[in-house]
Image: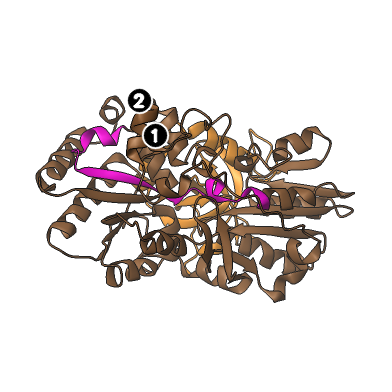
Amino acid sequence: MKFVDEFRAPELIAKAGEEIRRLAAANRHYRIMEVCGGHTHAIYRFGLKDLLPENVELIHGPGCPVCVLPMGRIDDGLSLAAQENFIFAAFGDMMRVPGTHGSPLEYKARGMDVRIVYSPADALKLARNNPEKHVMFFAIGFETTAPSTALTLMRAKAEGLKNFSVFCNHIVITPALRAIIDAPDMVLDGFVGPGHVSTVIGCQPYQWIAEEAGKPVVVSGFEPLDILQSIVMLLRQLNAGEARVENQYKRVVAWEGNPAAIRAMDEVFELRSEFEWRGLGFIPQSAYQLRSSYAQWDAEQRFTVPGVRVTDPKAAQCGEVLRGVLKPAQCRLFGRECTPEQPVGALMVSSEGSCAAHYNYGHLKPITISSAAAAR
Amino acid sequence: MCLAIPGKIIEIDPLNTTQALVDVVGVRRRVDLGLLQDAPPVAGDWVLIHVGFAMSKISEADAADQMRTLKMLGEVAAAMEEVRGYGLENDFPDPSPQKWTH
């Protein structure tokens, strides 16, 4: 509770907690997935689990783009960095993520020109300022960052800038949700929808989850009160036997999203036939690639990319954790072979991954081999 | 990368109205308004910024809420590092980053 006490409207937070306990029917178990890694971080940071009754369980979703990026993509991107007069630019979040032969930071230490940028626009500027070099932006992120990459590529094309390209790893959230919902061991009752992705795509793309899968979705803000209110809204729907898409985060998220951002993505990107996600495997139409009209700025078309595949270690149970079948600490590697310092599985890679959040915020309870085995 | 950072538009570049000088807790950097061109913001508006691009207009109260959320999440330092990084450090040398560079 100590984090919550520092927060806005603690009396409202306490009330929302009471309302959740009142709504949670004693004979029912509610499994709710928060899709976004930012929500996962907030839930752990604010200790929101302590406010929930035992039969309201939060399952942490696939919404951390660093976590779900296959190691082979990092290897492929870095394989290009050894070329003469080549600058590999990426967000700071990528710098410590291990590839087979090291992280981008380790490549930098070996003498490759690896740069941190905070915006794709800055990668473009590096290209303008270094006309004798090629600048490749290693792009990651969901629909939150994809429009910025798209607009940057539109600017590069308008300028006719030839020494710039994008190695595109942008992914799309709803196909991953479909993969989770369609899994035979699906246990989820409803979803806390991502806040910032929804500022771009709006609420309509979740409609099928309510209509086809019969599961409610509430798009949520990031404050403790937002998340608790979203859980209240989900429990009300579940108790009434309803499944609708609701928007708790109306102050930022418009139902139709940001049409200009959607247009920019549509101009530049098309869906790949499939893309691999760490922990979830290959998911159809779950990532973007550049359209042929942007081939000149597509690093994968412009250069020879080895197409490295690194399969997830079999012992890591990331998929089960992502689908909510296992809790992070129930994975056979959690906290032993797999830690944030030496991540084996996807969910330990970034602080927004559910296993890293669970590990970092001291919820680590000693588990024995037998309890882990019993959980399987 | 996944941070949503609130900022106030100080000035819009008269020569390129998709570019603005934005203040984030006293740090001023160039931010791209190209994704808000359906209803272009004006000086004095507050926006939520993702990786150097304004993604939505918000109220001043929401901006304060978002800043407090970042503080509670322990992410203010990361957000400020990100904002300082926009423009590769040399675009608006602090403390008086007033000039547009083209």
Secondary element type, mark 2: loop
Secondary element type, mark 1: helix
Find residue B13 and report its horizontal and vertical position in percent: 62, 56
Q: Specify the segment rendered in magenta.
A: A47-73
Q: Nearer the viewer, residue A288 or B101?
A: A288
Using the rendered image of the protein, determine whether residue B101 is visible from the camera's viewpoint: no
What colour has chain A?
brown
Residue at left 76%, top 67%?
A: A301
Q: Name the residue under label 2.
A: A365
Q: Which of marks 2 and 1 is nearer the N terminus?
A: 1
- Which disc, if any, is residue A179? none
Find residue B68 and report its horizontal and vertical position in percent: 38, 36
Quadrant showing the C terminus of chain A: top left
Q: Name the residue under label 1.
A: A329
What colour has chain B?
orange
Please state which amino acid type lies under the numbered disc 2: Lys
Query: Is residue A52 shown in magenta?
Result: yes
Find residue A237 and report its horizontal and vertical position in percent: 18, 59
Residues indicated by labels 2 and 1 sit on the same polypeptide chain: yes
Q: Do the residues labelled 2 and 1 touch (CB within 8 Å)?
A: yes
Q: How crowded is mark 1: few (under 14 residues within 10 Å), some or many (20 or more)?
A: many
Please identify the quarter of the rendering in which residue A224 is found: top left
